[in-house]
Image (cartoon, coloured by chain):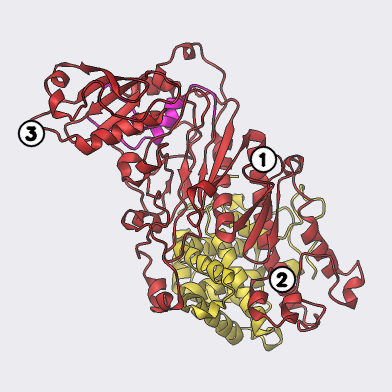
Amino acid sequence: MAQDSPLSRWAGQQVLKNVRFKLSLDDPRSSEEQWMTLQGDRAQLEALQEAVEDYVQQFLEQTSAQFSSAFLVPSQPNPSSPTTHPEVQSGNATSHLYSLSGRVETDLAPVNGSLDDRTHPKFQQRRALVDRSSSLTDAAQTHGIYLQPEGLLKHTLFLGSIADEETGSTLQLSALQLFDLATALDEYAVDAVTLPSLGRSGWLKSPPSWARVAAIAVLAIGLTTSVAKLLDGSSNPQVATSGSQGASSADQRNNQTVPTPSIAPGLQPVPPLSSAQPLPPPPPPGSTTPANPGLPTVTVPQNAPANQTRGSNGNGAASVERPNTPPQIVAKASQSRGEPGTQAEVRLNPEISSAASSRAAASADTNAAPAAPSSSNNTAFDTIPQVAEARSYFQERWQPPEGLSQTLEYTLVLAPDGSIERITPLGLASGDYIDRTGMPLVGEPFVSPIANGRSPKIRIVLTPDGKVQTFLEQ
Amino acid sequence: MPSTAKPTAPNLRELPLANQPDPAQLDNIKAQLDLVLLALEALVGIGSEAMLQAATELGLESVVADRVALWRLRQSSPLRKGQGGRKKLDIEEARALVLISCHLAKQHQELIRRAVALLEQLAEQNREPHQTALLGDYLDAFSNTYQERMEDAQQGHVQSLDHLALKLLIDLLFYSAPNGTRRLWLALLDRAKDPNHPSAVSSPH
């Protein structure tokens, strides 16, 4: 098929150079302006990944340490001793529960006399727990990236070389956010291992303009069944009180398919992607299945937040600006019901300044319509917001006339103020049916003004089954 | 490191073992595995049927053949009452329990996630987890089952049990991830194996 050919040329020819990443931490609990974005180069990403995974491992090992101190060695000091545990001393049982450990604190103060002995294994263990932040891998140490716990449920990520003015030097993470972050980074690590680096090919000199989009490493995060339910979700966080949870927990246990409202308005399920394969062939057109439970999914959202509320139609856009803005991959962490957005939505945007974009674009696409022979994965080529705006414009208006079996295509030249400068129908049918498409007149307002005052060309593809695709031609 | 836990043939090579654990370490492994499964039981309400089902799905029937086999593996924990009987757990059996535990955690990830989210919310409000049914039931089930099964000498304080239960709950979240089996395995073996950790300290017992 024609739409496969440029992509199949790209497959197997991917070049990975100068990978950059952009990790967006979308916290549904806070407003969009407060969302943090971490960015850096490949080395920093790897350092971050190592630091996080290291820390997670330490965290998990503390159960064993804590347990053995509390249960396997009966001669441990009395927990109610005033010097033992500040929270216990204050009589606040709740904060004791939420502290990191009933016994093992992350400070160096000895608990009792026996622990003054530095050879005591307990002391050594605690020191090790503290020192773990310094016993990082070389990469993490070089970049100064590490984490420290604050009790059981909070973690501070020291950003080191990744820190910038926006993020500050540290980032507070909840347990769920840490989990989501670790999951996103782990998936990247898997992909980074499997993606090959190949040399440049001669034919990269003049790729089609829509393929000059920077390549992305496709990531996937395992999602649970709750993601599939996000379509039905409301955007209002649900405060979990004892009342709402009181409806028997047995039901909660047994009913794994309870719909989970999406906490953030922008969340939605996405089609599964074969991220583990190094160079997946472009998926057959029409492979736009909604997220299946348990399958890894990645959403590649468009720039314009408004578009995120759409269903699968609006999902596949890799918003990439030539030359350097990284496309965004939103790995939607699953949301649990009833909690006011305690899960961070983690978006990881590796940016690869090579031209082998269309492979990734193909696999990121969700909108490939079967009946569009000359268009390929449009949503991956939303290089400017106006492309997405144009798509939504037509999506609202396009109603295929009865008896139309052909796909209509138009090239629109946009004026810098966002109106249409010129309309060029492609093909006879496009010319015949133009007044049925809702096409605005030349000079009428259409999309938002163009950022750099240029006049981009946008291709509009309208299919007889009602689908709309748009992409930037130049 | 590639993700593990394909449903059919578990790749045991993905769970590395540099040295054979010493008896104390093995004790710890047995106890930990039993507790992870206990946490799953208490939270999700599953029993040995689900664990055996998981064993079948993972192709581990040769290691965990039936309820009796499963019980004996878990009974090997040094914490358990009834000191008679089999107390051994070999590495293959430990690996099997790791795979089963993470498989179950993954299956029930949504619930685990919900419970952790709820816990975070309560902590922020400085409220007791018992105030919610989900967490209250979990903590009750955990401590009741623990006290039923474990030797009196290992009882510990109820507060410590609650704390342990909550810690295990969060651990389960991490074990439900694609690389969960690797995480659990490494956590069991403690940190003595990783060459990147110069300050590796052996387990205190």
Residue under numbered circle 2: A66
The image quarter in which residue B8 lies: bottom left
Image height check: is A153 above or below A294?
below
Outermost residue on the bottom side: it is B152
Q: In this rendering, does residue A272 appear at all? A: yes
* Numbered circle sitting on residue A162: 1
- Could you say which chain is coloured red in the image? A
Regarding mark 1 in the picture, which secondary structure is present there? Answer: helix
**Residue at image x 60%, y 69%?**
B168
* Numbered circle sitting on residue A402: 3
Neighbour class for label 1 at 10 Å: few (<14), some, many (≥20)?
A: many
**Percent x, y for residue A381?**
39, 28
Front residue of A99 and A255: A99
- Start and end of the magenta stretch? A352-379
Q: CA distance from mark 1 to mark 2?
A: 32 Å
For badge 2, the amino acid type reads Gln
The image quarter in which residue B204 lies: bottom right
Image height check: is A17 above or below A400?
above
Regarding mark 3 in the picture, which secondary structure is present there? Answer: loop
**Most frequent secondary structure within the magenta stretch:** loop
User: Closer to the N terminus: mark 2 or mark 3?
Assistant: 2
Q: In which chain is the residue bearing label 1?
A: A
Q: CA distance from mark 1 to mark 3?
A: 56 Å
Regarding mark 2 in the picture, which secondary structure is present there? Answer: helix
